[in-house]
Amino acid sequence: MNGPAGPDAPLVLVTGASGYIGGRLVPALLDAGLRVRAMARHVERLQDRPWRDRVEVVEADVADPSTLARALEGVDVAYYLIHMMGGGSSFATRDRAGAQAFAAAAERAGTRRIVYLGGIHPRGEELSAHMASREEVGNILLEGAVPAVVLRAAVILGSGSASFEIMRHLAERLPVMVAPRWVRNRIQPIAVRDVLHYLVAAATLEGTPNRTFDIGGPDVLTFAELLHSCARAAGLPRRRIQVVPVLTPRLASHWIGLVTPVPTSIARPLVESLVHDAVAAESDLRDLVPDPDGGLTGVDRAIELALARIRDLDVTTTWHSAAPAGAPSSPLPEDPEWSGGIVRRDERSRTVNASPQTLWSVIEGIGGAHGWYSWRLGWVARGLLDRVVGGPGLRRGRRHPHRLMVGEALDWWRVERLERGRLLRLRAEMRVPGDAWLELAVEKSDGRTVLHQRALYHPRGLLGDAYWWAVWPFHGIVFGSMQRNIARAAENAAHDDPAASGATAGSAGTGAPAPSRGGPGAASHAVDDEESA
């Protein structure tokens, strides 16, 4: 590991820095002694990353070419880690336009190299729409004036990756499963740590290579064998897999969307990539780049490492780290730039007999396994309905049980604003005809701790307004019980652990519960049948 980058070190740009690979690549590049500029469509989503103070951050969007000049100014190597996964029927057009705009902007900026991560696929076969789009993006970059290094990988094994989450949940939840014929296709998975190793090395390759390189781990096996490996690493009996000829990628992706946390819109392109063999056709990069210390990571070891990180709550990025392409970006209705329109509100305040720090630890631990401190059946039913119509539902959970970061997903919400110890603002990503927010705030007033809760909804058209009034009768049950039970959880924590009531302001920053059984997780179970799933 090298020390901090000096002023003369090459400057690299990482696009998609809030995403799964980008969020892990940034610290790897810093450790390699390079200067890093992190690019994101919404820079506030990077504010809680542990590497934030070590990098330059720039807000830019390939969909707005006018923003790219500043992002690429002075950049030696640019990493293009953008793909409109699950981005609707026009994703290929947007992928194409984004790659063309980026290649042209890199040429104008005098960038020396572009590095892109695509997918392995067989040559000469008809590809799925998403795989074809990824190949097209790679070709656009290779045909541009700036030399490009295009790395192609198959299934990436790592804690939090969409591919790994699909495999893990299928293996853990289904001792017997039916599967399509393509589970017998050969794939060459690669550990995420080895992907990062090659990505970092691509910045300093000698010469001006302008070509693709296939990258893969040391093992070639079928997807069915990969599922067996997941079960074995988790200490489970061997899974029974019955292959059937009628399960199309479309049907398989819907099934995965119901069984795993990965929604159908994300699962489908991943499933379609498995219809073909995905084995490296060459290993030329290994002739140019030394293997990582200890060699490339085998499948069993990669799975063990991923499961260990999940068990140790050390998952740094996840497949839902970045907001999906095309996610709404309109401002909160109270913001000065708000353009007007109807805003529906449900606002409630309540005095809580606990310290602000104890109350905040409950708030920051909300969602995921702790639940939503509200009408359980209502939340579960709404989550299932959202999954059916293609939304995230409640399956995404949370990255860490007690600590949140701006920009990360939390069940069907996205953390939009976080002032630790004071304010949590969540923006809904469930399928609704409008824009919705939930705010939870802590205030110290006249020596009392006050919990402020408000739900805001900006309807789109008559359908949006009809939706608000249709669910209005349930607000007292959902939002009223939520506020009562959050307050009760904090009061129970303060009662069971008096030390928690006297917590310092510094301890509130950890977002951790009280160490006794009265922490937020335990307190949530004290509300009996009103706790959320």
Image (tube, rainbow, N blue to C red):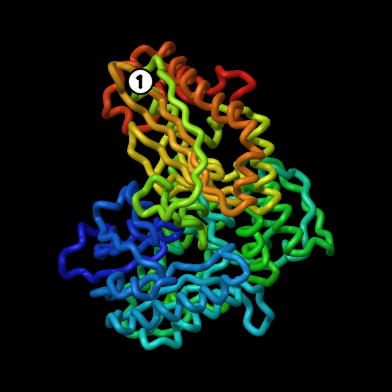
Task: Place residue 403 in its image quadrant.
Answer: top left
Q: Residue 165 at x, y = what percent?
A: 59, 50
Task: Place residue 372 in its image quadrant.
Answer: top right
Q: Residue furthest right?
A: 245
Q: Residue 62 at x, y = what percent?
A: 42, 71
Can residue 271 be seen from the camera position used here?
yes
SS for dot 1: strand
Work out which quarter of the rendered image holds the C terminus and state it: top right
In the rendered picture of this protein, how many numbered marks are placed on residues?
1
Q: Residue furthest left?
A: 7
Residue at the image position 81 percent from the left and 58 percent from the top: 243
Q: Which residue is mark 1?
A: 449
Residue placed most toward the observer, 98 or 469:
469
- Residue 261 in the image: above or below residue 440: below
- Residue 233 in the image: above or below residue 275: above
Task: Place residue 99 in its image quadrant.
Answer: bottom left
Can residue 308 be seen from the camera position used here?
no
Residue placed most toward the observer, 413 or 350:
350
Residue at the image position 48 percent from the left and 78 percent from the top: 97
Amino acid bearing label 1: Thr
In the drawing, does residue 302 fall left or right of residue 443?
right
Work out which quarter of the rendered image holds the N terminus and state it: bottom left
In the drawing, does residue 79 fall left or right of residue 127?
left
Q: Residue 56 at x, y = what percent?
A: 25, 60
In the drawing, does residue 346 fall left or right of residue 289?
right
Q: Residues within 10 Å of mark 1 (few under 14, many from 20)?
A: many
